[in-house]
Image (cartoon, rainbow, N blue to C red):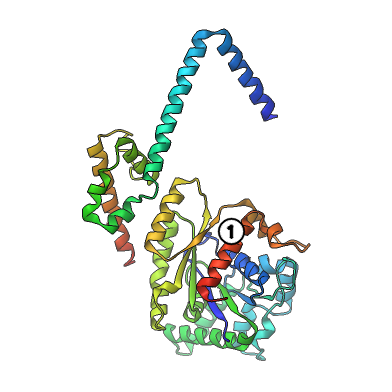
Amino acid sequence: MIDRALASMFKIVTDEAASNPAFGKKLEESLAKFGQDLAEKRMAERSIDGFHPLAEYKKDAAGFEARLAKFDVKELKALIAHHHLDPAGTLKGKGTKKTLATHVLEAARKRAERDAKLFEY
Amino acid sequence: MAPRTVSVVNMKGGVGKSTTVASLAEALASEGIRVLVIDLDPQSNVSMMLAGQDRWIELRQSSRTIDDYFNQYVYGGEPRFFRDFIANRVSDISGDMALDLLISTPEFRYIERHALEKWVSQGFDIRQLNTRFSRLTHSAIENVSDSYDLVLFDCPPGISMFAEAAIELSEFIVIPTIPDYVSRLGIFAFRKRALRSMEQRRFTDDRIWTLITKYEQHNALHQSEAAMLKEQFNVFDTRIPQAEQIARAAEWSDQKRTLEQKYGEAALVIRKFAAEFRERAGLI
């Protein structure tokens, strides 16, 4: 059922794109942008793979900031999103490399302190 | 040789303790390991999973439950050997498996209360009661030690006196946990108690193992928390996935089936976990 519904919907879109150049162009631009955004997002996610802020902070708190410096803005955002380091959404998805790195550092420090207390639970 | 004794425990409920016990016991028994499962949880989940409802009722009616075993010490009566309470050859997995079970019932929750009332009124304090439960459990296992390679305790959520006794007796502790914040809190809450018991017996904390359960590989929270658990605790490499087939496997089948039929694609993971467990516990 769903396959027929999707085939029908895509046929309407492809027919419209073929007969309406303005629509076709808009569609092409939108898909290109989506593709680019997605590729960048995936690349950032790959870069942060295996880097756990809390684990890294615990390993070497003093050198943590220097290790964060290797990440660009997109990667820092991916790090924050993946490890849920901005639960209240204070960054609103924005920030410079410096502010994002400071945010990650603070979040890692707080979590490390909190977890250390839990071992005394 | 004395059997390996392992408690499966977490302060938190719903993390997959009984499912871990049932699937691990079945996987190991299918490989020729002689396993005894002791259900210490009044919810009786592992009893139902491994014995099925009909046999569970029969066992209950014939007074072959863990409640009855401890009852004889609380209320007195004709003493029976521990082995007489055990249900032999349970599970709906096909093949001749040496997988036995001591079932619990919902009434088991009253035994502890009655024992406390009675023995405290006789002048025992909590520490002495703990010792008494531990000794009873210890002598129970000794009574059947030649018959098994592994004794698995399915502990209830929280810490009951029976769970304490099982922990006191266990050489290894498995803590199933969902990789999320509240489940991780459950480990912290319990770990210290387990650690104390291990240290008293000159064991080290590398005998306390965490098992990640209900894992969703595409869930960022699970990925992040699993990495954190690995950083903080001694974690099995195998992660038990959140899988419909594992939840379905809990329901008894009147027809015998293979482990693969029962657990579907998850059977592979369960076998992998069993292999890792065997290696860690020295069950080669």
The quarter of the image holding the C terminus of chain B is: bottom right
- B84 displayed left or right of B275: right
Can residue B236 be seen here? The reply is: yes
Q: Residue at x 25, y 51 (%)?
A: A64
Towards the viewer: A79 or A112: A79
Task: Check disc 1 and give the amino acid type.
Answer: Val
Give percent across and percent down for residue B267.
Answer: 64, 59
Give percent across and percent down for residue A68.
Answer: 27, 45
Is B51 situated above or below B115? above
Give the mark count: 1
The image quadrant of residue B72 is bottom right
Towards the viewer: B38 or A38: A38
Towards the viewer: B118 or B24: B24
Q: Residue at x 64, y 53 (%)?
A: B265
Residue at far left of view: A62
Is B274 situated above or below B66? above
Give percent across and percent down for residue B92.
Answer: 73, 66
- B252 displayed left or right of B188: right
Q: Residue at x 40, y 35 (%)?
A: A41
Q: Mark 1 falls within which chain?
A: B
Give percent across and percent down for residue B252.
Answer: 71, 62
The quarter of the image holding the N terminus of chain B is: bottom right
Mark 1 = which residue? B269
Can residue B155 be seen here? The reply is: no
